[in-house]
Amino acid sequence: MRSTTVNPELFGTRLSFLMSNHDPAQTYPRNPLASLVFFLVMSFSLLGLNACDQRPQVYQQQVLALGTLVDISIYGVDEATAAKAITAVTNKMETIHHNWHAWQPGKLTYINQQLAAGNAVSLNQEQQQLIQTGIELARQSNDLFNPAAGKLIALWGFHSDERPDAPPPAEADISALVSAAAKMSQLTLTGDQLSTVNPAVMIDVGGYAKGYAVDQAIAELRRMGVNNAIINAGGDLRAIGSKAGQPWRIGIRHPRQAGVIAALETHDDESIFTSGDYERYFEYQGQRFHHIIDPRNGRPAQGTSSVTIIEKDASRADAAATAIFIAGPKQWRETARSMGIAEVMLIDTTGTIYMTEAMNQRVHLEVDAQTKTIVAP
Amino acid sequence: MTLADKIVIALALLLLPFLYIEFWGNSSQGEVVQIRSVNDNDVTLPLDQNKRLNITGALGTSIIEIKDRRVRFIHSPCKGKQCVTTGWLNKDGQLAACLPNGVTVQIIGRDQRFDAVNF
């Protein structure tokens, strides 16, 4: 029998540990076959660890909506519910996109025609809500966020899917529109009737419609019992809940290089929106003209390369990112304060990072030692 | 040393390379290319196997090439060709997209750090 017994000097200690046998005399199996089987079972259960280590199941789908690619991630429901929810929010976003499109004929272009003709136009509930939100956000931003300045955006050629690399608009045309001073505060909503005293007003909800659509999509998800999700509409997102108690992890892409500049984890229900000069632009004679137009001088806002906002509502985050981008490195803090936005990061065109203290608490920057970071209280 | 000891040691040694590959090796959990389309099934392919693919999108066919641990759009039926001018991708998380055709190409590393990327 001696020849077929496992030598206790070789395996005794290890086996007694694994088997938690307190009797030192029985620290290894007597039966050699049993010891082999035991060894194999232990080995393969170790390999099996990998299978148990799988990530929680997140259903993810990419859809074309809002004129961009929208990534929908859903956790915590079965596949059938997730699929149904994805279809529902896609339809929801597409309806909003169609209704509020800045230049394709739809409800908004009709409203603008009536306003330009000096007529009052009746709005349904959704339209009233969106216009009212726009008036309020413009007021809070001292009109840096100005959805009434649609004519300026159109003049710059950004009311088309792809702005050709053609010359920028003539100086005289820009100053004429700046002098016309179209503002959201010139809109009057009496009951369901919208009118304006300034025929230069042309509503363009591009500065907050994406946020509005994301908010509506999240509301739709919640109605369907989905409480853990991310809706990422071409880089601007709202995240609710978590995945199995782990917060959603978000990377903020660097405005000038590949890779991320900062990482953060979401708390329960938050939107993260970024406005960047790299998103839409055209080039003419070596100069680049981006799409975020400063209503004060009618030209692309100077000094900022990107602004990132963390805020509960996506529509507020969207509008604030635009307004603070236009405010620039000198006035960003003031504008954030007047809009009641606590978590702001601005990166200027030289690469310096400006952050509120609240934002500084939230993000882990992934930058080199040369990057200048300024935290404002 | 008994016969059983020898068998156990031999088995343990045999198991070693297997364990090594499983936990540290450059297996299927390495960098992959994820190609997604609104009109086609999503495809995930290893970055280290050269390949050329035709992906059906909203407008037509996008041609994507994987070569020497890099990936790029060769052709897409869009006007702007931004996807093609993006050029080669070779780093974890990099993405090229043809929005008009609804096709995206992204490199996904073994360490998927983020659930979403904001830009």
Image (cartoon, coloured by chain):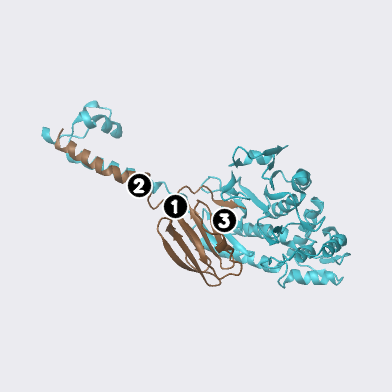
Residue most extreme to the right: A197
Q: Residue at x 35, y 47 (%)?
A: B22
Hue of chain A? Answer: cyan
Specify the label residue A145 is tagged with.
none
Q: Which chain is brown?
A: B
Q: Tell which circle, 2 or 1, labels the residue nearer the N-terminal end.
A: 2
SS of the residue at dot 1? Answer: loop
Q: In the depicted view, which residue is nearer to us: B20 or A49?
A: B20
Q: Is residue A307 left or right of residue A239?
A: right
- Residue linked to disc 1: B31
Q: Position of residue A160 (x, y in %)?
A: 69, 68
Q: Position of residue B2 (x, y in %)?
A: 14, 34
Nearer the observer: mark 3 or 1; the answer is 1
Q: Amino acid at mark 1?
A: Glu
Name the image quarter holding the C terminus of chain A.
Answer: top right
Q: Is residue A25 above or below residue B36?
A: above
- Residue linked to disc 3: A226
Given the image, what chain letter belongs to the residue carrying mark 2? Answer: B
Task: Please state the total of marks drawn on the protein image.
Answer: 3
Nearer the observer: mark 2 or 3; the answer is 2
Residue most extreme to the front: A285
Name the image quarter holding the N terminus of chain A.
Answer: top left
Q: Amino acid at mark 2?
A: Glu
Specify the label residue B22 is tagged with.
2
What's the CA distance linking mark 3 and mark 1?
31 Å
Marks 2 & 1 on one chain: yes
